[in-house]
Amino acid sequence: MKKILFILALVGFLASCSSTKIYPRIKCHICLSKTDGILLLPLNWQESFRQLSISDQNRLEAMILEIFREEGFTNVALYDQMDYELLKAGIKDVNDPIQRANINLELGIPYLLGLSLGELRWTGNWENSDPSDLASSTYWENDTQISNSLRIALMETATGEIISDYAVNTTIDGLPIPLGDGESMSLNFASLSKAVSISTRKGIKNLVNDCEC
């Protein structure tokens, strides 16, 4: 029983063993109103996000929209959820300046939000897990660490100008456990997708705070 309680306490402690640093590439220079329209570009448009499963991508997109709504934003949506409205307004390619500007002119959405995933890696030796499954919980030995880097950028639809751009880096360290006789092991029950989720949540909250009126 004591062993089980120790493991449960350990798992709870591991949830707090993450560290996130946010680096502003472009500090937000607008006043973002809670009624301003924000259109989230699909994560799978970025090849880097295809390192994660479709379900993980969908979960991250839902989380981003939920954070904005929790912060009081009333007009946020995922690009894929507005296919009909976009096509009706003649918008098929957001890279085309005229079509992108029409997102604001025709639909009243002044901002696009885009994310890209950079380095995503782990260090340590795999034990009792499949390293090809990025979504699975992991169990590693010997100096275990999960890390990722994420870019979050907000763009004006009318001009194509990047008005805020952040690099977000998260690491999740394993916890060294002494085994006696000078031996120890490192446990890490997190996953690569968990590190991306932490970066995304903290990065979006930082954007909201930085652009706050």
Image: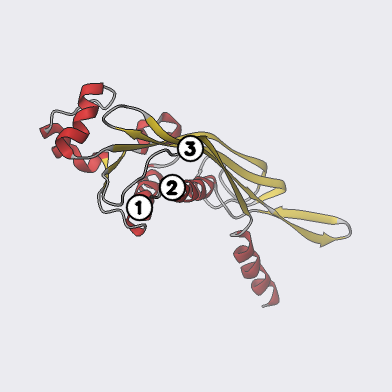
Disc 1/disc 2 C-alpha distance (Å): 8 Å
Return the x and y of residue 103 as percentages of the image width and height. 21, 33
Please report contact status of discs 1 and 2: CB closer than 8 Å, yes or no. yes
Going 32% across and 36% down the picture, which residue do you hit? 112
Residue that numbered label 3 is attached to: 27
Task: Name the image colouring.
Answer: secondary structure
State the residue at coordinates (30%, 38%). 111
Q: Quadrant of the N terminus?
A: bottom right
Q: Nearer the viewer, mark 3 or mark 1?
A: 3
Which residue is more in the foreground, 6 or 104? 104
Name the residue beneath numbered marker 2: 204
Q: Which image quarter: residue 14?
A: bottom right
Residue at image mark 1? 68
Decide if residue 188 is on the left or right side of residue 120. right
Of callouts 3 and 1, the N-terminal one: 3
What SS does tag 1 mark?
helix
Q: Earlier in the sequence, mark 2 or mark 3?
A: 3
Task: Provide residue 49's location: percent of width, then percent of height.
Answer: 43, 36
Residue at point 68%, 52% (across, down): 174
Which residue is at 32% across, 33% downward?
Answer: 156
Q: Nearer the viewer, residue 187 or 103?
A: 103
